[in-house]
Image (cartoon, rainbow, N blue to C red):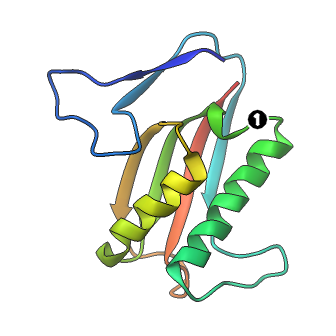
Amino acid sequence: MKSQEINSENAPAAAGGYAQAREVFDGKRTLYISGQIPVTVDGKTPSSFEDQAQVAWDNIKAQLSTANMSIENLVKVTIFLADRQYTIPNRTARATALGDHKPALTVIIAGIFDASWLLEIEAIAIA
């Protein structure tokens, strides 16, 4: 897949770790990843935000891997946070998970389905 970041000079700059938009040139397969929750395969939910974020990103990576894709195929990520206090730890976890890759991004503060979950991540990938 060929893609490029789009960051118009006529709009505010991205505030770290993402692109304002991502253009895909030759994508042939699209993967829509449902909200991945911070629950391990054995049904456990870690207590700390950092550990929950790691599990949710691991679940995103598992879906990508099963579809023969990787983080680099992500073009759009939406992260739902249970509370604004997780904004900075979320940014750190996202940077760790994505490395230098910068998909389009939305972060929403919202009530999450299970009160013990501190975040949920959904994504779109193109190969």
Is residue 84 shown left or right of residue 104?
A: left
Please tell me which residue lies in front, 67 or 17.
Answer: 17
Residue type at mark 1: give it. Met
Quadrant in which residue 108 is drawn: bottom left
Q: From what the image shows, is residue 83 above or below residue 72? A: below
User: Exactly how many numbered labels are in the figure?
Assistant: 1
- Please rate how many residues cluster around mark 1, counting C-alpha atoms within 10 Å: few if below 14, some from 14 to 19, many from 20: some
Q: Residue at x 47, y 51 (%)?
A: 78
Q: Nearer the viewer, residue 27 or 12?
A: 12
- The relative height of residue 41 versus residue 93 in the rendered view (above or below) is below
- Name the one closer to the observer, 69 or 16: 16
For the C terminus, give its image quadrant: top right
Indicate left or right for 17 with 62 as reference. left
Decide which of 3, 88 is in the foreground and name it. Answer: 88
The quarter of the picture where the N terminus appears is top right
| Point 53% across, 36% down: residue | 101
Identified at 40% across, 40% down, the residue is: 18
The residue indicated by pointer 1 is: 69
Residue 46 position, x and y percent, is 65, 85
Q: At which x and y percent is residue 77?
A: 50, 46
Q: Position of residue 110 (x, y in %)?
A: 37, 70
Spot occupied by residue 72 in the image (x, y as percentages of width and height): 63, 33
Which residue is depicted at the point 78% across and 82% down?
A: 43
Residue 123, placed above or below residue 103? below
Is residue 48 rendered to the left or right of residue 21? right
Callout 1: SS: loop
Would you identify the image quadrant in which residue 52 lies? bottom right
